[in-house]
Image (cartoon, rainbow, N blue to C red):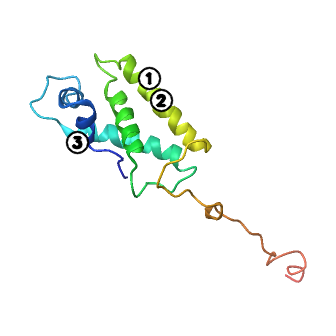
Amino acid sequence: MTAYATVADMVSRFGETEVLRFSAGDGALPETIQPERIERAIGDASALIDSYLRRRYAVPLAVVPQAVERAACVLARYDLAQGGDREPTEQMRLARKEAIAWLEGIAAGTVTLEGVATLSAGSSARVQDRDAVFGSASLRDW
């Protein structure tokens, strides 16, 4: 699965201290960022993003627009802020709500991703019926 952001993107957007806190889980604060927990949250956020994008775009995206990277970071941050003795802040809730609304706009076709080609009408599955090989007339002498 393709992730639309990296641990470095999270640090760039939210600061090393916050990402360090998120990587710790419910234990003591580690000296360095433990990437496993952050990467899992980014993967979950990327899967959620794909569920909205696949209605109009081929996923995973080959080139990740900055807006998609931002949405992945915002969604991952919200997920990481839940659990244990932590709870997302109001700012995190609003940012997540805005990201989901943006993704819903993409799925509905009211928002487009710049520089990413949409699926053409001919790219959907087609079903064609054909004449039956066996029927009452061909099986009469059986």
Q: Is residue 40 above or below residue 56?
A: above
Q: In the drawing, does residue 89 fall left or right of residue 54?
A: left
**Real-space CA distance between mark 1 and mark 3, rounded to the nearest whole angstrom:** 23 Å
Q: Is 61 rendered above or below residue 26?
A: below
Direction from residue 15 to residue 41 in the image, left or right: right
Q: Amino acid at mark 3?
A: Ala
Displayed quadrant of residue 68 = top left
The residue drawn where x is 81% and y is 76% is 131
- Residue at 55% over, 56% down: 118
Q: Is residue 86 left or right of residue 30?
A: right
Q: Which mark is residue 8?
A: 3
Gap in angstroms between the C-alphas marked 1 and 2: 6 Å
Say which quarter of the image contains residue 123. bottom right
The amino acid type, in three-letter code, at marker 2 is Glu
Q: Which mark is residue 81?
A: none
Q: Which residue is mark 2?
A: 98
Residue 16: x and y, percent?
A: 18, 31
**Foreground residue among 40 and 141:** 40
Residue 111 shown left or right of residue 7 in the figure? right
User: Farthest bottom residue?
Assistant: 141
**Which one is in front, 68 or 82?**
68
Task: Please count the marks in the image.
Answer: 3
Mark 3 residue crowding within 10 angstroms, few (<14) / some (14–19) / many (20+): few
Mark 1 lies on residue = 94
Q: Position of residue 128 (x, y in %)?
A: 74, 69
Nearer to me, 25 or 103: 103
